[in-house]
Image (cartoon, rainbow, N blue to C red):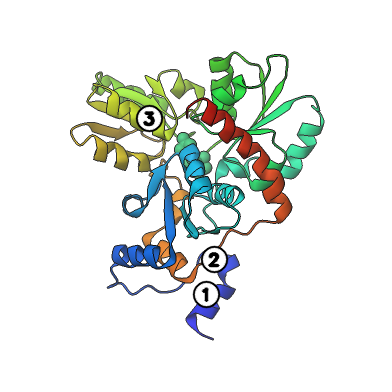
């Protein structure tokens, strides 16, 4: 059996095509060539490794990536991000081939809300509107009324009539933050992101003492005690915009460290310090996002595998909540 056939057979187990890549190959050139030959577009999240961001056609947050996926005319969408993002792209543009370099690039937040348990929970509150953060599985989206991302969540909540009760899933930290921001009493699912819960309050305080001029900026997936001390809270693109527009010269960044690449590129004269985790490992790197590598990106474009395949009913029912989110976002000018 050839190397390719063997790799295909192991795809489900490995999550990626485990084929040796010639170390002398210029991967940047090869990926560019494949993009052109196959009319493919690379959509990358800010948490991807720098080299992948540099070769992407579009880099953005979850909302921007969904908007790009919906409108692209490319034949192949190569998603340099995690599984729920690639699934969302497939739901929004089902006739396109959607590739993800490593199928095991999941998300702890999406995993924290298994659809069969959520279905039972939802049945107890039949009158509630369900708003789900986009960081959830495609099946969970079929149980959702309106989807949201961190950059449009409060607009989505505001779109629900005041007399309607709301279930918010799966992120309890984002949910608590939104309760304060919107004044609504949201019924929360108890999920969280392993990366955004790792920041050390104590170490951040010490950093702030050492650099009193630094602004602390945080993603709303962080815990309340971090958000309370933050100078600015926003989605990844919101954080990037804030750093660029602010006159401050130093920032402590409480989100996944990959975003610092764009912050530094856009603001070469400013200093960005990753918020320290409460242990010694580099845990503010998302272990799922960082499963994608240049080698896997090249292989998935070369062999058009692994591909995101969704059942028709998931696409039909799951995209309803995403379409509603995109409509509300467009009306809000997002
Ligand atoms: P945004 O980029 O939409 O802010 O989301 C952050 C995140 O954790 C994605 O997994
Ligand atoms: Fe999921 Fe957290 Fe990684 Fe984002 S950073 S993909 S929410 S595990």
The answer to whether residue 140 of the structure is visible from this angle is: no
- The residue indicated by pointer 1 is 7
Q: Is mark 2 in CB contact (under 8 Å) with mark 1?
A: yes
Badge 3 element: helix
Label 3 – label 1 distance at C-alpha: 40 Å
Q: Quick check: is the Cβ at mark 3 less than 8 Å away from ligand 1?
A: yes
Which residue appears farthest toward the left when viewing the image?
Answer: 269
Question: How many residues crowd around disc 3 within 10 Å: few (fewer than 14), some, or many (20 or more)?
Answer: many
Q: Is mark 3 in CB contact (under 8 Å) with mark 1?
A: no
- The residue indicated by pointer 2 is 14
Above or below 52: residue 318: above
Above or below 86: residue 66: above
Give the mark, 2 or 1, whose residue is nearer the N terminus: 1
Label 3 – label 2 distance at C-alpha: 34 Å
Q: Measured from the top left, where is residue 90 in percent x and y?
A: 58, 52
Q: Is mark 3 in CB contact (under 8 Å) with mark 2?
A: no
Left or right: where 288 falls relative to 209: right
Question: How many residues crowd around disc 1 within 10 Å: few (fewer than 14), some, or many (20 or more)?
Answer: some
Give the mark, 3 or 2, whose residue is nearer the N terminus: 2
| Residue under the image location 34 percent in, 29 percent down | 241
The answer to whether residue 252 of the structure is visible from this angle is: yes
- The residue indicated by pointer 3 is 239
Above or below 71: residue 200: above
Label 2 – label 1 distance at C-alpha: 9 Å
Between 186 and 76, the one lying in front of the other is 76
| Residue under the image location 24 percent in, 22 percent down | 248
Give the mark, 3 or 1, whose residue is nearer the N terminus: 1
Q: In which image quadrant can residue 127 be found?
A: top right
Between 21 and 77, the one lying in front of the other is 77
Q: Measured from the top left, where is residue 117 in percent x and y?
A: 75, 40
């Amino acid at each position: 059996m050839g190397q390719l056939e063997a790799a295909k057979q192991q795809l489900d187990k490995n999550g990626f095509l485990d084929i040796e890549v010639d170390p002398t190959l210029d991967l940047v050139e090869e990926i560019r060539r494949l993009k052109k030959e196959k009319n493919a577009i690379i959509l990358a999240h800010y948490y991807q490794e720098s080299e992948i961001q540099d070769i992407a056609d579009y880099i953005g947050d979850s909302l921007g990536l969904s908007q790009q996926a919906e409108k692209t005319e490319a034949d192949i969408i190569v998603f340099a991000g995690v599984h729920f993002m690639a699934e969302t792209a497939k739901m929004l543009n089902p006739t396109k081939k959607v590739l993800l370099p490593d199928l095991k690039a999941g998300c702890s937040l999406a995993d924290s809300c298994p659809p069969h348990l959520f279905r039972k929970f939802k049945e107890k509150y039949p009158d509630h509107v369900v708003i789900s953060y986009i960081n959830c599985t495609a099946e969970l989206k079929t149980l959702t009324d309106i989807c949201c991302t961190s950059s449009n969540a409060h607009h989505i909540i505001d779109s629900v009539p005041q007399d309607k009760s709301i279930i918010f899933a799966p992120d309890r930290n984002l949910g608590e933050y939104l309760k304060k921001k919107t004044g609504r009493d949201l019924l929360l699912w108890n999920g969280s992101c392993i990366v955004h819960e790792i920041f050390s309050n104590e170490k951040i305080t010490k950093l702030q003492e050492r650099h009193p001029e630094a602004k602390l900026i945080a993603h709303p997936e962080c815990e309340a005690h971090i958000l309370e001390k933050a100078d600015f809270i926003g989605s990844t693109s919101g954080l990037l915009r804030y750093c660029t527009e602010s006159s401050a010269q130093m920032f402590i960044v409480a989100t996944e460290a990959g975003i610092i690449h764009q912050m530094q590129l856009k603001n070469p004269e400013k200093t960005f310090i990753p918020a320290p985790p409460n242990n010694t490992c580099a845990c503010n790197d998302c272990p799922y996002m960082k499963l994608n590598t240049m080698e896997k990106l090249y292989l998935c474009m070369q062999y058009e595998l692994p591909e995101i395949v969704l059942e028709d009913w998931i696409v039909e029912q799951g995209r309803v909540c995403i379409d509603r989110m995109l409509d509300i976002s467009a009306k809000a000018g997002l």
